[in-house]
């Protein structure tokens, strides 16, 4: 019985590590995209309006992904049931 518990715990920990790694990779990609926009702006390749639009697009995309993930995540026991 202890082996099952240990395996379950280790699997759960591995999933948490993978989730953190995915989150960090996503944050790194967002930071890289924002830095690329700043670099283009500083080199004069894009003007402030285009830089602002690009940064807003990055943020909007990030928020849409977060919202979609939240909507796809089950709310827990009793989700979707009504007591009325």
Image (cartoon, rainbow, N blue to C red):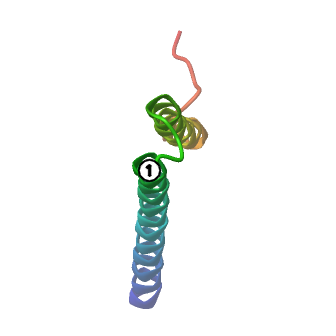
Q: How many tags in the picture?
A: 1
For residue 13, side relative to residue 50 (left or right): left
- Out of 16 and 43, give the one closest to the viewer: 43
Q: What residue is shown at x 49% (from left), y 60% (from top)?
A: 29
Against 11, residue 65 (above or below) is above
Residue 24 locus on image (x, y percent): 41, 65
> Residue lying farthest top?
84
Characterize the local packing of mark 1: few (<14), some (14-19) or many (20 or more) Cα atoms within 10 angstroms. Answer: some
Q: What residue is shown at x 59% (from left), y 38% (from top)?
A: 68
Residue 25 locus on image (x, y percent): 47, 66
Residue 55 locus on image (x, y percent): 47, 39
Q: Badge 1 is on which residue?
A: 34
Name which quarter of the figure residue 71 lies in. Answer: top right
Against 12, residue 82 (above or below) is above
Against 17, residue 45 (above or below) is above
> Residue lying farthest front?
44
Against 4, residue 34 (above or below) is above
Label 1, secondary structure: give it. Answer: helix
């Amino acid at each position: 019985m202890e082996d099952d518990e240990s395996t379950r715990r280790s699997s759960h920990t591995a999933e948490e590590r993978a989730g953190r790694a995915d989150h960090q990779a996503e944050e790194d990609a967002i930071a890289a995209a924002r830095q690329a926009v700043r670099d283009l702006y500083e080199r004069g390749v894009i003007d402030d309006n285009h830089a602002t639009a690009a940064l807003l697009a990055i943020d909007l995309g990030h928020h849409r992904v977060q919202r979609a993930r939240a909507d796809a995540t089950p709310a827990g026991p009793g989700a979707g049931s009504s007591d009325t």
